[in-house]
Image (tube, rainbow, N blue to C red):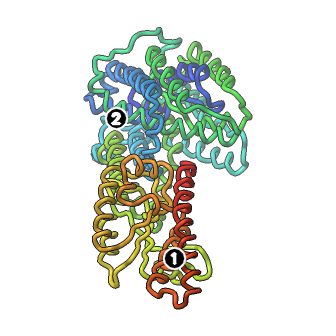
């Protein structure tokens, strides 16, 4: 796989072997995952190859320039990962939704597969965009090499058959079919002289031994900066996902920030030993898990085997057909392309996610991996902002015979309270949705017959910004102008503290702040009882005496209730 992915990146195959060795060894020393294996990864290799092409370098015509850029990218990506660790920016992965990542990976998979068609068919065409590749394939279709096609078909048949057999048998250790195919095809190619007799393209000379350490050439840093940001984000998202998957499966803890440090050091030091950006591999990590690996010590044995290959076996790879490496890549990505079927499911379940997936997928195919991820991220953020701007207020009603209040649109049995509206905010109140909230609140201010009271249920609100606060203040003035009493219900700790700091209690007195809806309703009923007594009045001296006593007790009791209410609000924890 390492050699195949180096071919995908547009650099000689030995760089795939170097990237399989050095970063993996360094991750063993600093990483917190016991199972993740890092090295060449197809998606990252494609992004490296795309960046080299965007900078106007052809790996086949000028391999040295391509190698220099690939090694420099490893160093820059490593520095960016360390910077993320220092600034604790691991949280950025939460801003990439699953639909954006899936659309990106499926789009990149198609780019990977089309880029390998020239090796499968035995054509010599320049690397290009998706459209350019298809056009060049069409123009040169008459020049395909029959022997190369035959090698590709036999290789793919063997790879698919062995993988399907391993899956059906639930084999813990899958058949190492890639290694078997590489060994057999190299042996036959050498004996039959595929290159000389049939014109089959082969890997060529692979220098033995380890490269000496050297500082990477960073003269192109300014041109590599933006592409490396995208590679860094994709690399960390993939690795974080793999780390969490196996940590949960085997029940141990990992440190996200330490992972950034480990990956950063692995790529920085890897860049000094002629490696290109290294990333975690789910398939290779799964093998480690299945064979019972418990620590990163297994990596030491892997590195020993790789070291033997680099020191003694690389000259034997000279006659390995490129078509075999292309077949390895093509078969590895056949399952990802099947995810195109998820589009239909997303269309029926969530059209906004469908739009995010499709826009990321199309942008990746037609504009490349860097712009594809950025556009997908931008579209998902715009959709999120649009949804936030359309936040809704729900009017609540009481379910008869209970103290439960539910949305009257969803629960037909829920009854409105006469002269009182209970409205629940459906999310945080901020500059994005303040206009939507204000328009909905205004409908209650002009409601016919007019309201006497409105209870604002803030139980679902985690934060309010200054724009949201100013909107609430303006609405309290409008409600007071319409002689509508305002009650505040269920404020969470951070929101309550913000209201107190910003003197919102001057607009809505603390006596009208309540823990829950029922306590607010009880308060209103007490008010109605007092008002009824004042209107009807007692009819006898005995009633008058009893009424005066009752009113006196209530006057003593209500302030006490208010004090208790305020104390409960102060003492209630930050989380509801």
Answer with left or right where residue 144 lies relative to residue 413.
Answer: left
Q: Which residue is mark 1?
A: 525
Answer with left or right where residue 157 lies relative to residue 350.
Answer: right
Question: Where residue 21 sits in the image (x, y, percent)?
Answer: 55, 21
Find numbered disc 2 in the image and state the secondary structure of the residue it sits on: helix
Answer with left or right where residue 117 lies relative to residue 136.
Answer: right
Question: Where residue 130 sits in the image (x, y, percent)?
Answer: 32, 45
Picture quarter containing residue 441?
bottom left
Q: Is residue 54 visible?
A: yes
Query: Residue at coordinates 42% horizontally, 25% vertically from top-left?
Result: 83
Q: Crowding at label 1, few (<14), some or many (≥20) Cα neighbours within 10 Å?
A: few
Question: Where residue 561 sits in the image (x, y, percent)?
Answer: 55, 62
Query: Residue at coordinates 42% horizontally, 36% vertically from top-left?
Result: 233
Picture quarter containing residue 373?
top left
Say above or below: 472 vs 329. below
Q: State how many labels appear.
A: 2
Residue at the limit of the structure toward the left, as seen here: 56
Q: Quadrant of the C terminus?
A: bottom right
Q: Crowding at label 2, few (<14), some or many (≥20) Cα neighbours within 10 Å?
A: many
Q: Quadrant of the N terminus?
A: top right
Residue at the limit of the structure toward the front, as seen here: 541
Q: Nearer the viewer, residue 228 or 2?
A: 228
Query: Residue at coordinates 71% horizontally, 31% vertically from top-left?
Result: 293
Q: Which residue is mark 2?
A: 50
Question: Where residue 442 sits in the image (x, y, percent)?
Answer: 30, 71
Say above or below: 568 vs 351. above
Marks 1/2: CA distance?
Answer: 70 Å
């Amino acid at each position: 796989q390492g050699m195949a992915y180096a071919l995908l990146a547009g650099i000689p195959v030995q760089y795939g072997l170097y990237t399989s060795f050095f970063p993996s060894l360094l991750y063993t020393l600093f990483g917190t995952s016991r199972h993740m294996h890092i090295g060449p990864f197809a998606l990252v290799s494609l992004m490296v190859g795309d960046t080299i092409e965007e900078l106007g370098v052809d790996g086949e015509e000028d391999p040295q320039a391509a190698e220099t850029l690939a090694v420099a990218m490893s160093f820059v990506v490593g520095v960016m990962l360390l910077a993320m660790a220092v600034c604790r920016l691991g949280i950025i992965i939460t801003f990439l939704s699953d639909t954006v990542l899936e659309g990106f990976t499926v789009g990149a998979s198609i780019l990977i597969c089309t880029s390998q068609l020239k090796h499968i068919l035995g054509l010599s065409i320049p690397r290009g965009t998706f459209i350019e590749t298809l056009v060049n394939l069409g123009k040169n279709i008459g020049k395909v090499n029959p022997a190369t096609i035959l090698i590709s078909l036999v290789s793919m048949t063997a790879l698919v058959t062995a993988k399907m057999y391993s899956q059906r048998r639930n084999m813990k250790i899958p058949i190492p079919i890639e290694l078997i195919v590489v060994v057999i095809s190299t042996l036959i190619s050498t004996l039959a002289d595929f290159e000389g007799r049939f014109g089959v393209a082969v890997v060529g000379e692979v220098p033995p031994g380890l490269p000496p350490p050297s500082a990477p050439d960073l003269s192109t840093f300014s041109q590599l900066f933006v592409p490396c940001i995208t590679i860094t984000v994709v690399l960390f998202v993939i690795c974080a996902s793999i780390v969490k998957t196996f940590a949960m499966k085997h029940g141990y803890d990992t440190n996200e920030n330490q992972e950034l440090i480990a990956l950063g050091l692995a790529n920085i030091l890897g860049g000094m030993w002629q490696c290109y950006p290294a990333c975690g591999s789910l398939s290779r990590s799964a093998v480690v898990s299945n064979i019972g690996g418990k620590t990163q010590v297994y990596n030491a044995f892997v590195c020993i085997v790789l070291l033997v290959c680099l020191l003694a076996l690389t000259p034997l790879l000279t006659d390995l057909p490129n078509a075999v490496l292309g077949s390895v890549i093509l078969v590895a990505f056949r399952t990802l392309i099947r995810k195109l079927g998820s589009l239909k499911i997303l269309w029926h379940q969530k059209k906004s996610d469908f739009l995010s997936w499709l826009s990321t997928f199309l942008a990746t195919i037609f504009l490349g991996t860097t712009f594809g991820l950025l556009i997908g991220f931008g579209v998902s953020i715009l959709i999120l902002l649009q949804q936030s701007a359309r936040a809704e207020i729900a009017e609540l009603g009481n379910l008869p015979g209970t103290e439960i209040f539910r949305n009257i649109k969803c629960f037909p049995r829920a009854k409105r309270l006469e002269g009182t509206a209970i409205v629940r905010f459906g999310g945080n109140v901020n500059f994005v949705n303040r206009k939507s909230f204000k328009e909905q609140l205004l409908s209650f201010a002009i409601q016919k017959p007019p309201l006497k009271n409105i209870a604002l249920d803030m139980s679902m609100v985690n934060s309010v910004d200054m724009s949201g606060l100013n909107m609430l203040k303006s609405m309290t003035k409008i409600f007071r102008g319409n002689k509508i009493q305002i009650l505040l219900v269920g404020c969470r700790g951070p929101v309550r503290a913000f209201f107190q700091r910003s003197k919102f209690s001057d607009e809505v007195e603390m006596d009208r702040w309540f823990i829950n809806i029922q306590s607010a309703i009880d308060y209103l009923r007490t008010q109605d009882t007092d008002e009824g007594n004042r209107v009807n009045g007692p009819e006898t001296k005995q009633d008058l005496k009893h009424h005066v006593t009752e009113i006196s007790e209530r006057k003593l009791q209500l302030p006490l209730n208010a004090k208790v209410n305020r104390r409960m609000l102060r003492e209630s924890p930050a989380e509801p």
